[in-house]
Image (spheres, coloured by chain):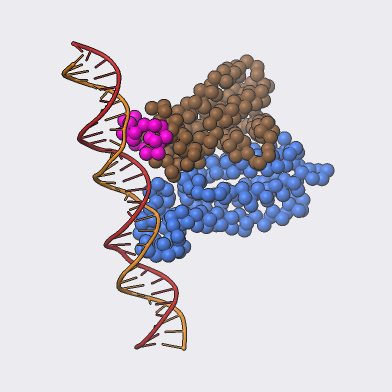
Chain colours: A brown, B blue, C red, D orange
Amino acid sequence: MDAILDATARVLVRDGYAALTTNAVAVAAGVSIGSLYQYFPNKEALVLALRERHVRHMSALMMREAVFWDAAEQGVPLEALITRTIHVAMAAHRLEPALHKVLALEAAHLEARHEEDGTEGVLRALLERYSRGPDAEVTVPDLDVATFVVGRMAHALIHAAVLDPPPGADPHILERETVRAVMAYLTA
Amino acid sequence: MDAILDATARVLVRDGYAALTTNAVAVAAGVSIGSLYQYFPNKEALVLALRERHVRHMSALMMREAVFWDAAEQGVPLEALITRTIHVAMAAHRLEPALHKVLALEAAHLEARHEEDGTEGVLRALLERYSRGPDAEVTVPDLDVATFVVGRMAHALIHAAVLDPPPGADPHILERETVRAVMAYLTA
DNA sequence: CGTAAACATGAGTAAAAGCTCGCATCATAG
DNA sequence: CTATGATGCGAGCTTTTACTCATGTTTACG
């Protein structure tokens, strides 16, 4: 069950989505195709289950490291929060980078978008918090638009910085510049 | 030949990449499969040719509208140039939005990245130009990193604003905010 | 016209891959 | 030990689909 998903991930990373056959997965998992089909009704369900598990793993890691989001209620400066959030998000992307890349690149068309579901809600709430009061740090006019812009921008940069960085670039610098980009937009 | 590529695009948009069969393309084009294989050695070459043509179309539109890039040599302010560039890029994405989306989403794995090839070079040169002199507008430290960041950020926002905007959002506002994001980062 | 080269045709082939199903094996209970 | 249900097995069926090729048709040209 979990072993089958592990095997799916291995084959996916090794051979790509085009070469992912149910038989290959069964062999890689050390079980028969018959057993595979006892747990997953078809190939699509298999890949979907793998993706969901992967998203769960990433979310779990982020949530564990990100209790500090409650700190928004206290007087944590925006920059500290953004810095920490982006750091954690990049760490999550580094969990299984190769798998994440393949899923994003070759399995993106399988059903609904997984990303900005819970994410957008949290982001929106944070922006709201930091744009209120006399000493508001977020100066952007439309919060819905800002949520959209920051969400897309941050995700693209995190994804690219971890999975597709320019050759010879320092990861720390990419991380710092990602933070700079988000901060610059929010406080322009 | 061109009719076959048109048919490929139509089938791709209508049915998605998974349902793209050479026979379906031949039928949609009103030719026989035999004829199709006289012009394209195999299915992959067919899709690749379509993608290249699509990229050429977009590039052509951008280049036609973007002679003003030479204006960087004169005293055009950075913001005007960025505004115009992003406007043109969005227009290019609106040429065949559905096709662009399918190609980006379901045919991304077919061979090399197409985007930031010529683009990154041009972008890098522009940043260099605007970061020199006493009245430099670009204040970013590392130009290589900045090229990377701006390239990814702008592309993600342009792509999202045109092909995947939040429901009920004003395109003009999304465009303006994209410009704001890029400008804020470059002149922070 | 005649010839030949280029182009078009579509039934058929062959290989791949998703999935089934009858049988074997094992675990648990009585 | 036997019965019963759950789980595992994998040869092979079936469908799908990329691609071929022998034949027909059009075009170019002297």
- A141 or B166: which is nearer to us? B166
- Does the magenta segment cover residue B169? no
On screen, residue C28 above or below B62 = above
- B2 or C15: which is nearer to us? C15
Give the residue at x 40% y 39%.
A24
Q: Bounds of the magenta span?
A: A23-44
On screen, residue B142 above or below A39 = below
Q: Residue furthest right?
A: B134
Q: Left or right? Give the position of C24 relative to B151.
A: left
* Camera sees residue A138: yes
The quadrant of the picture occupied by the C terminus of chain A is top right
- B185 or A52: which is nearer to us? A52
- B109 or B9: which is nearer to us? B109
Percent coordinates x, y for residue A178 in the rendering: 65, 33
Percent coordinates x, y for residue B160 in the rendering: 54, 41
Give the residue at x 62% y 58%.
B64
On screen, residue A83 above or below A101 = above
On screen, residue A114 above or below C11 = above
- Does the magenta segment cover residue A42? yes
Give the residue at x 78% y 43%.
B136
Give the residue at x 47% y 50%.
B99
Q: Give the dominant element type of the magenta stretch: helix, strand or loop.
A: helix
Percent coordinates x, y for residue A39 in the rendering: 34, 29
* Camera sees residue A157: no
Q: Left or right? Give the position of A107 relative to B71.
A: left
Q: Name the image quarter holding residue B29.
A: bottom left
